[in-house]
Amino acid sequence: MAAVIAYTISFTMAFLLFVVQPMATKVILPQFGGTPAVWNTAMLCFQLLLLLGYIYAHVLTSALKPKFQIITHAVLILLACVVLPVVFVAPSTQQLSHEPIRSLIWELLQGVGLQFFCVAATAPLLQRWVSYSNSSLAAKPYVLYSASNLGSMSALIGYILLIEPNATVSHQIMGWGYLFAAVSLVFVVFAYCLSGKAEGVKTERLNWSEVSIPRSLLWVFLAFVPSSLSLGLTSHITTDIASVPFFWVLPFAIYLLSFVDAFASRPIIVPIAKYIAPGLSLFCLLAMCNNSLMRLVAMYMDVMVLHVLTFTFLAFAIHGYLAERKPNVTQLTWYYVCMSIGGALGGVFNAIAAPMLLDSIFEYPMMMFVGSMLSFIILRARHANFRIGEEGRFILTTLGMLLLASALAYNVYEMIYGRDHYFAAGWIDGATLSMAMCFASIAILVMRRTYRAFFYSLCITCFVVLAVARIGSVSMLKERNFYGVSRVYENPETKIRYLQHNTTIHGIQSLVPESHLKATSYYSGLEEIMAHRLPSVAGEPIGAIGLGIGIVKCQTKPEQHMDIYEINPLVVEIAEDEDLFTYLSDCPGKHDIVLGDGRLTMAQMPHEKYGTIVIDAFSSDAIPVHLLTKEAMQMYLDKLKPGGIIVIHVTNRHLDLRPLLAVQSEAVGAVAYQKFFRGEGDLNFSAFWVVLARNDATLAPLLTGATDWHKLLPEPDAKPWTDDYTNILPYLEKMR
């Protein structure tokens, strides 16, 4: 019976621990502009709290007798119940803009810090206390860690599939508080029962002379690499789709599932992963360093699937090796401390160190390189006599050469007939791949230890290529901050200069004097929309969410004023630098730039201020979800004068937002129309724009003066997004 209760508490506490992470992050996400960095920073906060909880558990079990350990922690966890419900206090606008990392961590600590700390410490404490009892688990308390991770994974999967789609945020917070209080009560009663069984048990304190520093550092390192890879993969996905719980949870759930399998009595996936991880990670690394090979992969499968599969097998292989190196129960809490240090270091590296030290998002391929090398070393350590004979050498050589040759041929084709001439790094793909082939051929033909030589040479070559391409890319400016990487490129052949934020171009300016103020990139369609507004509001102030390089300002008349809302200080610096772009200085009209989240800052403006509101605030291709909720749409309508319109840019490679805007417009009593504008040449891109107004009469000048506008009608069962409810899954498809 005690074993069943222990399993239940471990599972439920872990469920609470990992449900609160996406839930709390989702609550505070809108305050920070919906940027992908919010999740990584929140994870850093939670990992540090987890580390503190494990250190607390280690100190508690080392310093006090079992009975007093149980009493102390029971009092602390009851105190956490007293300060419920969970409340998040938003920082000031200035703190959000200038100290986003510190503000985010402090808000999380105030909201759920104590509760998270208590639950985090429960797992190692419960395992240690069970070892004091006469339970069947006393001799093997580590199996509770597997149950704990199973609860963690269930929490994450349950959150994205059941909780988030069906419960509002306020109900989630309330339900979490009730469950926390109930489980805490059960835990205190169970701890009281264990305290009676622990009478007379002598505490086995950790003998530091028996602690191996190299072994401890190995535990830290083996926990660090998958942690960093998990956060890197999350950033890789959310940068181009959306920073929402679904994409936070997917890598995290895989990360936890690898712990479940690794610490199970009979692992299922770990034995397979140790063979697959080296080769798959090497292939993914090679694809990351070569655009043409990545396109070749994309012809047969989604590139994200390749990244997810690679991370999956790496995490299982590395965590399997970490589980094999677990110590006896006397060092149990120290083992968990080392693991949590490694996990926290992954968060520190991705959320703090990498943005400070690297001017591009290089930490993900860097960790892919480390993970690939580590997985191969693990395989070699388990199979010291592993060799490939002459037949294996021939097969490996043939497959490797065919793969590399096909990628090279495809690359040459792209260089001649492709359109990716904006990126200087793309032109060196052919030379890059040739160098990789050269190294691989030398390794295979000259060195006898084929598999090891082939793997090491290709892996190191790929990493060097990534570093050289990163350093050697031709750009006028490249800087990184909390909101991502911003680069300014110039193409002397086409005489254009453009801003790229993360992976997407956010504005192009022609260097030819007669066309340097022309609306380019996605904004050519905006000219048509602005030319057909009602005369009564055509000269009224304009509100624009999203600055880019300032192209939107050229839609103003000489006597007109525009308020431009931008959350990223670096983008403001770039747009205002006349040595880079001149839209803000040379376009007619006046403007003010309001630094901060567009929705939060615009909400402070007077009602009926603007004749037009333009929303183009995607970070790379990731959508800021909070700008599209029902409450946000209602706020925009409140800021419009009678006869005003809302213009939204919805072009996206991964999401079709038009059905969503149909639902949102109906929810606020508005009408919405959409049009596809086909781009021509290097200066104009194809784009979808949507216009919203209070009624059809407001949009009559636009609909009669232009063609191909189509009314957006909501699907029968579609549910509008609100600040309490969002579900991105129905819109996960490419724009048609």
Image (tube, grey):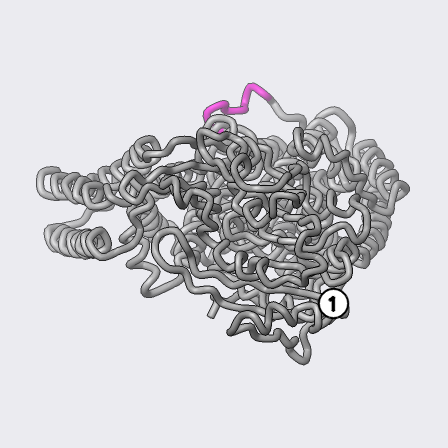
> Residue 393, relative to residue 50: is it above or below?
below
- Residue 710 visible, this angle: yes
Which residue is denoted by mark 1 in the rendering? Answer: 694
Q: Is residue 559 magenta?
A: no
Query: What is the quadrant of residue 566 in the picture?
Result: top right
Residue 120 position within the rendered picture, expressed as x and y whole percent measured from the top left? 70, 41
Nearest the eye: 281 or 556? 556
Residue projecting furthest to the top: 209
Q: Is residue 211 magenta?
A: yes
Query: What is the quadrant of residue 195 in the picture?
Result: top right
Residue projecting furthest to the right: 82
Q: Is residue 140 left or right of residue 514?
A: right
Question: Magenta span: helix, strand or loop, mainly?
Answer: helix
Q: Secondary structure at mark 1?
A: loop
The structure residue drawn at horizontal position 46% and vertical position 44%, both measured from the top left corner, is: 517
The structure residue drawn at horizontal position 53% and vertical position 50%, both measured from the top left corner, is: 238
The structure residue drawn at horizontal position 32% and vertical position 59%, both measured from the top left corner, is: 297
Residue 259 position within the rendered picture, expressed as x and y whole percent measured from the top left? 54, 49
The image quadrant where one finds the N terminus is bottom right
Write the start and end of the magenta stretch as one range. Answer: 208-215
Q: Residues within 10 Å of mark 1 (few under 14, many from 20)?
A: many
Q: Is residue 35 left or right of residue 304?
A: right
> Residue 168, relative to residue 42: is it above or below?
below
Type of amino acid under label 1: Arg
The structure residue drawn at horizontal position 71% and vertical position 38%, both measured from the top left corner, is: 121
> Residue 658, relative to residue 653: is it above or below?
below
